[in-house]
Image (cartoon, rainbow, N blue to C red):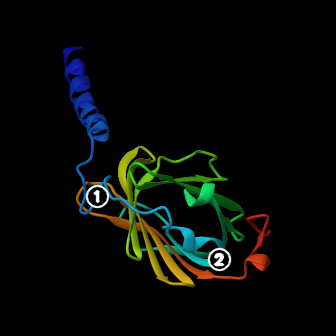
Amino acid sequence: MRTRAILFVVLLVPAAAVAESRSLPLPDPPGYTLKRTGNVGDFDYFAGGWTTHQRRLKERGVGSDQWEEFPATLCMSPHLDGIATVDELYFPTRGWAGLTVRTFDRQKKQWSIYWVSSERGVLEPPVLGGFDGRVGEFYGEDRDGERPVKVRYRWDKRDADHARWEQAFSYDGRTWETNWTADFTRGDTATLCRDGRPRR
């Protein structure tokens, strides 16, 4: 009986250590900050309709280099004199869509970006930041399954008709893994959108 009790304790210790490591806050990976600021007009250029090529890692956080690629259509509308924007991103080959809501805090001069997908229906925690020139960076915290992650969105306004977005997670507080990219090309809004949403 005593042998069994000792074995039980030995087995519990690693499990407790794993649980504790999952609850500990991650250190800040390179570049991470919640103090980056921007301007109320940062996303004005993105109004209207866009076609986009999406690339997403098949598996995140395991060192995979296998990507899946698929098209999408995005339609964005500004609100409240530009301090809020809403866009819907439709993935015709996936059968689902996503919604992005951005709000600008005039006092902090900072954007908060929220995402919800039609698959889950859950509003994800925001990333915060703004643009410096044509490049914007936004950071926050989330969970990927049971694993805590630091999150980075990066926007690149390449020119008036092209943009690139990237999402990266840090699982260890030291390195970033880019797991989703999107290349955007401006399209004809009347053709791509109806009432501010992608045509189905």
Q: Mark 2 or 1 closer to N-term?
A: 1
Secondary structure at numbered mark 2: strand
Name the residue rendered at 28%, 38% in the picture.
18
| As drawn, 132 above or below 191 | above
Return the residue at label 1: 32
Quadrant of the image containing the C terminus = bottom right
Q: Residue furthest top?
A: 1
- In the rendering, at what x and y percent does residue 46 appear? 58, 72
Q: Are marks 2 and 1 in contact (CB under 8 Å)?
A: no
Name the residue rendered at 51%, 79% in the picture.
163
Q: Residues within 10 Å of mark 1 (few under 14, many from 20)?
A: some
Q: Residues within 10 Å of mark 2 (few under 14, many from 20)?
A: many
User: Marks 2 and 1, how far apart in space?
Assistant: 29 Å
Toward the viewer: 13 or 69? 69
- In the rendering, at what x and y percent does residue 108 appear? 38, 50
Q: Quadrant of residue 132?
A: bottom left
- In the rendering, at what x and y percent does residue 115 appear? 55, 54
Secondary structure at numbered mark 1: loop
In the rendered structure, find residue 14 and report the number of the disc placed on it: none
Q: Amino acid at mark 1?
A: Tyr
Q: Quadrant of residue 177?
A: bottom left
- In the rendering, at what x and y percent does residue 8 appear? 26, 24
| As drawn, 36 above or below 144 | below
Toward the viewer: 191 or 168? 191
In the rendered structure, find residue 50 and report the number of the disc placed on it: 2
How many numbered discs? 2
Q: Amino acid at mark 2?
A: Trp
Quadrant of the image containing the N terminus = top left
Name the residue rendered at 31%, 54% in the picture.
35
Name the residue rendered at 29%, 55% in the picture.
33
Q: Is residue 51 left or right of residue 30?
A: right
